[in-house]
Image (cartoon, grey):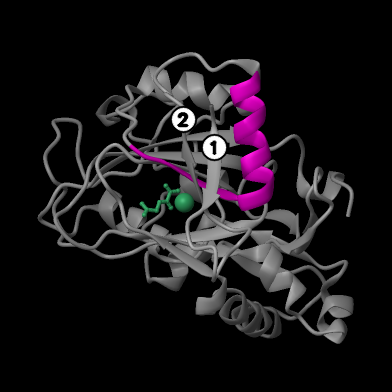
Amino acid sequence: MVAVRAIDPAAHPDFAGEVSGIDLTRPLTAEEVAAVAAGMDRFAVLVFRDQRLTDEQQIAFSANFGPLEQATGDLAQGAARRLSMQVNDISNLDRENRVLARDDRRRLFGLGNRLWHSDSSFKPTPAKYSALSARVIPGAGGNTEFADMRAAYDALDEATKAEIADLVCLHSQLFSRAAIGFDAFTEDERVRFAPVPQRLVRRHPVTGRRSLFLASHAGAIVGWPVPEARAFLRDLTEHATSRRFVHAHVWRMGDLVMWDNRVTMHRARPFDAREVRDMHRTTVADSAPTLEQAA
Ligand code: OGA
Ligand code: MN
């Protein structure tokens, strides 16, 4: 029997749940899929412990919730790529499973994950769910933090809610990487990572709850001067990521954490760059660009 309980019921009764009574290595029943989907609608982040998954099992599990994204947001590595295109490589390893050098371009690009973001908000149709599987974790550090964009929206004053109701932001990995001083993009990457428009306020299709759709990828607001937009988005992000909206996940080997990118942001926390951290992510695409979804 699948059961879901709040991990920190006092601080977050409806954010971040732990699921028990399910084995993700096996095909799920329709009842199990429905229970997980209901858990996602309520908690937005779900933790599954002790799930030693292969990539094939992780892909099969994720595909229960919609079509999977291809990992086109990663740097294109051609034959040097370590994992299949259905799996985002969230590790610090090369194809021979050697730890990347501190100044390796792939590592520096990946450090963008330390900024608050929502996965694939830089794609025309962004991500719905991400599922991140911990294969090898470092001895210390390397937590992942999640922020509840529904609670952050609810806590805004009415004037701000009115001001942002119809705003459209432009998202690109060029913006998020520029924020940490990474600008070593090729011409091809600049074209591939061109900005895309996304609504700033979204409505969850099942619960009807509104939420902020923010990410460090957001670098402009349509119709606004850029410095004003950046300062405004920075203030909103500071509000939305205050500690009262945040749950920190401390990884154990075999954890799978799934989150709803439509209503959360997340970020990686630092760890010793000489240690191995091997995480595999599958990503379920949303149904349409946010501008085509009901506001
Ligand atoms: C991701 C991501 C954070 C982490 O997998 O999309 O941002 O802690 N991961 O690795
Ligand atoms: Mn991410």
* Image marks 2 and 1: residues in contact by CB distance under 8 Å: yes
Upstream in the sequence, badge 2 or badge 1? Answer: 1
- Residue 285 seen in render: no
Disc 1 marks a residue whose amino acid type is Ala
> Ligand 1: does it lie within 8 Å of the C-beta at label 2?
no
What residue appears at the point 32 percent right and 27 percent down from the top-left corner? 83
| Horizontal side, residue 289 vs residue 144: left or right | right
What residue appears at the point 45 percent right and 72 percent down from the top-left corner? 179
Q: Quadrant of residue 150?
A: bottom right
What residue appears at the point 41 percent right and 54 percent down from the top-left corner? 185
Q: Position of residue 78 (x, y in %)?
A: 34, 28
Q: What mark, if any, has residue 21 been given in the picture? A: 2
Check if residue 200 falls in the magenta segment. no
Mark 2 and mark 1: Cα distance apart in space:
6 Å
Label 2: how many Cα within 10 Å (few below 14, some 14–19, many 20+): few
Q: Can you identify the residue that label 1 sits on?
A: 3
Q: Which residues are magenta?
A: 31-49
Q: Nearer the viewer, residue 13 or 43?
A: 13
Number of numbered markers: 2
| Horizontal side, residue 103 vs residue 87: left or right | left
